[in-house]
Amino acid sequence: MIDKAKKIDIKSVIENDFNFDEEFYVSKKSKFQDDFWDFFDESLTRQTSVPISRLQINWENYRCHVSGDSNEARSIPDQLIYELKILTAISYLVDSSLKGKGWVKPQTVIVMVKILARFFSAVYKESLISLRSQSGSLSHISSITDIRLHDIAETLKSYSFKDGKALKKGLKDLTSPIVTRYLGKGVLWTNTDIEALAFKYETQRTDYNPVMPNDLFKFLSNRACGEVKGFLNWLNIEAADNGHAEIPKHKVLECSSGGNLVFEDYTNIRKIDREISAALSKKRHFGTIKLRAKFKEDHGILLSDVLDYIYKVQRAAYTIIGMYTGARYSDLTTFQVGCIKKHHGIYVLLGTLVKSQDDLSPEENDIWPAIPIMRDALRCLEEISRVTFNPYLISSRETVPIGVKPTPLSITGFVGSMNNYLREIDTTERWRSWVISSHQLRHSLANQLARADLGLMFIAHQLKHLYSALNAIPPSVTLMYGNIADISAQRARQTTNAYTEIASSLYDPDTPVAGGGAEEFKQRRRVYFQGMAAQGWSKEMLMAQLSKQGIPFASVGTGYCGGRRDRLLKDGTKETSPCIGSLQCNPGKCSQAIITSTHVPQWKRIYEQNIQMAHDDAFAHAKDVHLTAALEAKMVLESLGEKVENS
């Protein structure tokens, strides 16, 4: 049986003359000889978001059956099925067998092989009809190695499926030397031949906008934040986010009974219903008729009112998580009760990164930075999970029956929930034609983080584009020097014209700047404005022009970097920049850095956090370090005209 940690090395396959015999296990459940291969593993979190049909293949569905004299082959000969089994096993089990790639996911292989089988069925049928019409003989194809390039090209002319990308890859994979070895001889085409063929592809959408308009992002965010805060207030749970959010009205919130009492009574009735349904083997509410009547009498509302409210809060929470994690749908479905953790002084979400990761890699140890409102949204879902009995936070509102394995929400359900929420709250129908997609959420977050001037490194980390480099955060690093995500994300929601604000704070000669390079920059700025004024430019005209040109500096979150490294001094010596990587950049000391008033919230956060840590016994060993960092932050703030009270 396949060992979870085992990979079949290509070297051993070649040198030891490895064979996929009939008894060889291609998965934990299936042998090579089986007509049904099942790669679904209930123990793997990374497979929770994968449709089970993509993890299973029934070879019998492709076995050749000739129906009387109808001249129609329904599928492919046994030999082709055997060879496709070989390709499937090699692609999935043999490490680095095809084009230098390592361990691939079973669903990737299964989808590709199913597409190949469907195409070869069309090739075989085309060949059979053609040869019978000419000479009455049977098809010349009994093996993949019998298929000619001409057969493929002719079939493609009438082939209706637009799966060119996967089909092209499958045909190319069949040219691999290791596959050829098991087929006995090579196929009758090359990679170059395949590239020249006319495949059909899915039409790329031209009407799709990958980024939400700022107004829509702000509208959804603010409304969902209010929904989440209202639910936490109702349950008397303190919210982590202290930003202002208007709490939408709902019948349940107007109930005179306390939220805690209402929710506990509601949860208890759902629990009893679940137990009765399990005992009767069918969903019944008869056993709680009296409890339901008493619930209405005690609280003045129906259970359906609470369900309606919970569902609304649930969708609002999905919206916040989707908008602010930057995680893919497959990653979101791995978040479970208890996923909020504290690492090195900051809050993170603990889940499982799915894309580009081996299914057998360690799970539930990947992290996503968690801003306060995101933690609030997850806290709401944790409370709701007490009602649904489902540990997956992205899940249905329905109760998981006793004895049934909990599952997360499908991608259709997840995206549908957010679109339904938008339709419900958009009473003016301004966004009635807008459709939210899971990938759009990632693009929109990146856009908002950029508008918030958060810095490329943090954005890359949030979107898991630099996952391998930032997997383990060093204790001395707090995600871009002070965990500024919460401040910057809030600023993104509130800023009306980010470019004008940034340009004004940087270029206006009357605005303060700080940092190691501040004095030199202020002098150059003053000279520039004096020169432009002499040419007839007003300050307002210059600000409007400069705001359109972008910022000629790299953002490091807490300031701007001029990008210069070693600096040649007048005495001929070189001054090396104190930069030790963007995650530990210190604009307060670096001579290449400029800090503007737009960075005040980040520096306030740095000051407050380091003061807090300096007085925390858990960080007693680094008290001096935190006090020094707090002092530097205070000096920066005072240079920008901000008053800082001693703590």
Image (cartoon, rainbow, N blue to C red):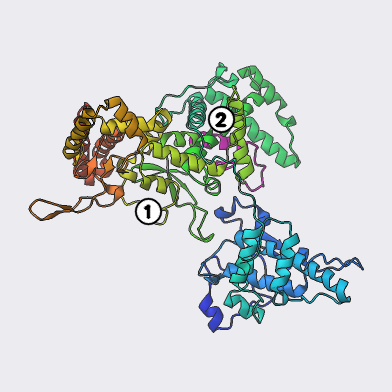
**Residue 404 covered by magenta stretch:** yes
Residue at the left extreme?
571
454 lies left or right of 228:
left
Which quadrant is home to the N terminus?
A: bottom right
Relative horizontal placement of residue 405, taking residue 530 as reference (left or right): right
Does residue 476 appear anywhere in the picture?
A: no
Quarter of the image that includes the C terminus: top left
Q: Hey, what amino acid is under mark 1? A: Ala
Span colored in magenta: 379-406
Residue plotted at (68% across, 24% down): 292
Find residue 214 and report its horizontal and vertical position in percent.
Answer: 47, 32
Q: How many marks?
A: 2
- Residue shown at 41% from the left, 33% from the top: 492
Q: Which residue is mark 2?
A: 313
Q: Looking at the image, can residue 16 be seen?
A: yes
Instruction: Please identify the dominant SS of the magenta region.
Output: loop
Task: Identify which residue, 613 or 190, lies in the foreground.
Answer: 190
- Residue at the (53%, 35%) spot, across then down: 319
Cα distance between the residues tagged 1 and 2: 33 Å
Q: Which mark is residue 343?
A: none
| Three-letter code, disc 2 | Val
Residue sitting at x 32%, y 41% = 557
Residue of label 1:
472
Secondary structure, mark 1, is: loop
Q: Nearer the viewer, residue 294 or 157?
A: 157
The front one of 39 and 446 is: 446
- Please state the horizontal and vertical placement of residue 211, each as a whole percent of the image: 51, 39
Q: Which residue reaches farthest front?
A: 535
Q: Residues within 10 Å of mark 1 (few under 14, many from 20)?
A: few
Compared across the picture, whether 603 is left or right of 548 comes to: left
